[in-house]
Structures are given as C-alpha cells and as structure tokens.
Image (tube, rainbow, N blue to C red):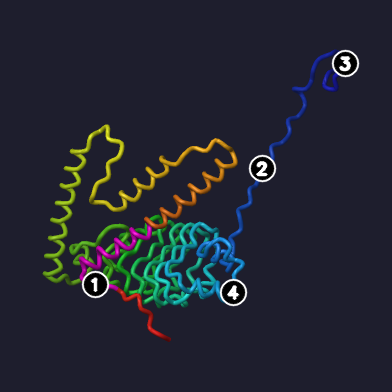
Amino acid sequence: MDATASPQGINQAHLLPEPEEQDIEFSETKPVRLSLHLIVKRHLPIGSSDWSQEKIISELNKVKRVRLDRENIGEIDSLELFSTQVTNLYLQSNKICTIQNLECLPNLQVLVLSNNQIKEISGINYLEKLLLLDLSENCLEKVNIECIPKSIIILNLTGNSSLKEADYKPGMIRNLPKLKQLNENEISNQERRDAGVNVDSDEEDEEAESEEEKEEEDEISEDQRTETKPGSELFVPFTSSEADLEVSASSSYKQLPKIESSIQGIAADMLLRSQKRLEDMTLQHKRHLQQITNIKIKSKIKPVSDKVKPT
C-alpha cells in the first residue's frame, strides 16, 4: 500500500505539512591583498613568475602606468614595488575603503578610484603633481577640500549619493585654482564669479572663443550626420579619435573566423575578452590624456615633466 494513502484508499499526500523554505545566504568574496603575485600577473609577461626577484623588480621599475582594476582589492598596498616614475594609477572597480600608501608615487598625475567603497577623501594632499582624480561611484559622505591637491585640473565625484554638488562646488572653485572640470562639466567664468573668484578679461575672451569653436564643431558634426547614408555599415566621424578606435575594435572582432570546436571556442572567447579589455584600458588612458591636454591648451598650463629628480 502507498505510504501516503489512508486505509480507505484516500491519498493524503496533500495533507502533509510543506517543508519550510530556507533562506540561502551567499557569502561575498573576501577582498584580496595587493600582492607581488597580482602585480606581476597584471604587468609582466607570462612566465615572469619564474624570473629572479632582482629581474622582476627591475622590470616593474620600468612601468609608468599601473593597472590594478577589477581585482577585488581591499587595501592599497605594495606600490613601493614600482618606481617613483609612475604617473597613472588605475584602481577602479575594487573594494577599497581607504585611500592610503601612495607616498611612494610622488609623480602621480592620474588617479582613478571609481566604483569602490571609499567614504572620505584622504591620503592624497601630498601628491603635488596630481592632475586628474576620479572618485565617482563611491560612498563619500563629505568632501574635505583641504585634502585635495591644489594641482587638480579634472575632478569627478559623481555617483556619491550622499553628496550634493551645490554644497561643495563653490568651495572647490575657490580653493582649487587650477580646477577646470568638475563632475564631467567644464567650469564657466560665470560659475567662478558666483563663487567669488575674480575672472580676468583675457579668460573671458578665451571662454568666448572656445564657445565659438564648440559651435563650429557641432555644426561640422551635424553636417557629417546629414551626409551619412542610412544603409552604410560603417561610419566614423573624423572629429573623434576614440570613436575611430572603438569602431575599428568592433570591426576587428567581426572579421575573426568562427571556431566550431567547443574547447577552441572557449579559448577564442577568452582571447577576445582579454583583447577587448586591453583595448578598453587603452581607450580610457587616451581619453584621460586627451582631457588633460585639452585643458592644458585652453589654460596655457605648461606640461608636467616626466623627468624625475634624483633623490
């Protein structure tokens, strides 16, 4: 007889109590330490882990752009393995809570810490050559303007829900004399006046000229869009070098042959993702350089020398 049937032959399975639902907890991956192994993996060729320690350090000392993004890093550390010649540091999309241990990089010009868990700006006021600081998509609760280097030209604090731009923007403009772009928008002379900053007539003339140039560029772009045929498969405006790179990258993927084998397919997919990631990094670096260069030209700021004074 069925175990769920009564003596009268009535199935009582539906009368049995239903099992209680259990809450399944998914533990977050713990942040990792910024180790020598991780640094070598990101900056030196395959097989370099078998090199002698002297050779590894020697090669790392040649690196000027440090990329340690998307590595689940919880703490900034071990950067003294690089030389003081490092100018760019990319640490976006990690789990960093505190900005620290950057004293060993006195010539840093670009610092990207977007999409982390940083709650306050600290540990960077001694970076006297810093030009670009990206702290977007973090957990900043307040802005300590005195902790931001006076050399800053481009600053991005978007995506910090506790911050309101109106609360800190005037103070930024007053206390950061070289600041030209805040939260992806250029600072106008009117905003400078509103913040109590004296604006020279020469600067007003330059702003008017730049506005005219921008209008001309918009007109050219509009003409190009009008002349573009709807059926054309590939159109790259000559005014945007980044667009050229992006379209070229996407078209190169389309030209790759299809591999039917499953193992080869997985390998090819991994290769494509790696290539795409490298190209994204290159584009980001070029974009940052272009932003800084454009602002330097407009502001007639002399470029920072790459030469490092001997200690």
Which residue is under mark 3? 7
Which residue is under mark 2? 23
Q: Which of label 2 and label 3 is nearer to you?
A: 2
Residue 59: percent from left, percent from top: 50, 71
| Distance CA(mark 1)–CA(mark 3) | 95 Å
Residue 1 inside the magenta-drawn segment: no
The tag earlier along the polypeptide, 3 or 4, is 3
Amino acid type, label 3: Pro
The tag earlier along the polypeptide, 2 or 4, is 2
Predominant SS of the magenta segment: helix
Residue, x 14% and y 71% (percent of image)?
A: 200
Q: Which quadrant is the N terminus positioned in?
A: top right
The secondary element bearing badge 3 is classed as loop
Q: Of residues 243 and 59, which is closer to you in this image?
A: 59
Question: In the rendered view, would you say 225 is above or below 95?
Answer: above
Using the image, tell me which numbered label, if any, was put on residue 53. Answer: 4
Which residue is under mark 1? 301
The tag earlier along the polypeptide, 2 or 1, is 2
| Distance CA(mark 2)–CA(mark 1) | 59 Å
Residue 9: percent from left, percent from top: 84, 13
Question: In the rendered view, would you say 203 is above or below 253?
Answer: below
Give yes or no for contact between labels 1 and 3 (Cβ–Cβ under 8 Å). no
Q: Which of label 1 and label 3 is nearer to you?
A: 1
The secondary element bearing badge 2 is classed as loop
| Part of the protein shown in magenta | 284-303
| Distance CA(mark 2)–CA(mark 3) | 37 Å
- Mark 3 is surrounded, within 10 Å at the Cα level, by few (under 14), some (14 to 19) or many (20 or more) other residues, namely few
